[in-house]
């Protein structure tokens, strides 16, 4: 079921290419794609159908929707040059994260943190608010969140905290017990592992 929801997002993304920007049909499919993005992972976890294929399909659907939105929205939003530079800087940080994750773990690591989810939500809302909020302000807010999320993601990847729990919060690895000196009857100290 979750993969079907993800597939709907891919279809919505492709269909957006053929609709006029900011038309009612564009908004309807855009919102449907956003809702599918929020629900597919939850459905997969709830039904016990989390899979590597589903995760990859979700990433592909995100890329399709993002690419379509760039193609359709960038020409009409009137993005200021400084915002392009900020977006490029965030993209560079994300590329460095991907490369460092591969160098450190021999795999492409992605961390699903709360800040990444907040950034995604803000980015999703941005076109919906473009008529109400000046892009200089909404774009700066999204870029600030994206910058923090990208730096945080890089930190987690480089420190080995690249796992995520179901709430999207980074997990700590279990550490070995810390040796604690213990006094014996004759005053000598022995190292014992402390119980946590």
Image (tube, grey):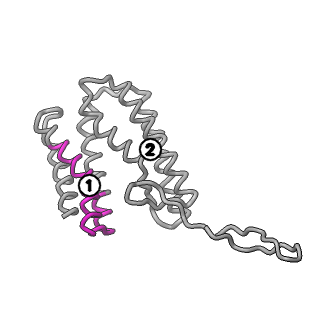
Please identify the dominant SS of the magenta region: helix
Give the secondary structure at mark 1. helix
Q: Is residue 111 above or below residue 72?
A: below
Q: Earlier in the sequence, mark 2 or mark 1?
A: 1
In the drawing, does residue 176 fall left or right of residue 41?
right
- Is label 2 or label 1 in front? 1
In the rendering, which numbered label is found on residue 61? 1
Examine the structure image and report whether residue 101 is included in the region drawn in magenta: no
- On the picture, is 152 further left or further right than 122? right
Looking at the image, which is closer to me, 109 or 45?
A: 45
Residue 181, numbered label: none
| SS under mark 2 | helix
- Which x, y percent locates residue 82? 44, 27
Q: Measured from the top left, where is residue 1 in percent x and y?
A: 18, 64
Q: Is residue 99 above or below residue 107?
A: above
- Residue 46, image quadrant: bottom left
Answer few, some or many: residues within 10 Å of disc 1's Cα (few below 14, many 20 plus, some between 14 and 19). many
Please state the horizontal and vertical placement of residue 81, each as a whole percent of the image.
Answer: 41, 27
Residue at mark 2: 91
Residue at the image position 37 percent from the left and 47 percent from the top: 117
On the image, the x and y values in percent for residue 156 come to 53, 54
Q: For this view, does 112 lie left or right of residue 175?
A: left
Choose between 115 and 146: the one closer to the eye.
115
- Give me the residue at 52% from left, 59% from top: 161
Q: Which residues are magenta?
A: 29-58
Residue nearest the observer in this picture, 30 or 83: 30
């Amino acid at each position: 079921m979750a993969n079907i929801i993800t597939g709907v997002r891919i279809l919505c993304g492709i269909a957006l290419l053929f609709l006029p920007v900011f038309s009612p049909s564009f908004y309807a499919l855009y919102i449907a794609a956003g809702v599918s993005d929020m629900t597919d992972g939850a459905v997969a976890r709830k039904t016990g159908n989390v899979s590597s294929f589903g995760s990859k399909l979700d990433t592909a659907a995100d890329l399709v929707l993002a690419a379509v939105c760039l193609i359709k929205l960038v020409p009409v939003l009137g993005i200021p040059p400084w915002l392009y530079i900020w977006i490029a800087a965030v993209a560079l940080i994300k590329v460095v994260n991907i490369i460092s994750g591969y160098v450190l773990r021999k795999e492409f690591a992605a961390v699903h943190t709360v800040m990444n989810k907040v950034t995604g939500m803000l980015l999703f809302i941005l076109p919906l608010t473009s008529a109400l909020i000046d892009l200089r302000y909404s774009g700066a807010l999204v870029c600030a969140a994206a910058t923090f999320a990208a730096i945080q993601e890089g930190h987690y990847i480089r420190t080995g905290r690249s796992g995520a729990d179901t709430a999207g919060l980074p997990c700590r690895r279990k550490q070995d017990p810390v040796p604690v000196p213990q006094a014996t009857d004759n005053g000598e100290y022995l190292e014992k592992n402390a119980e946590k």
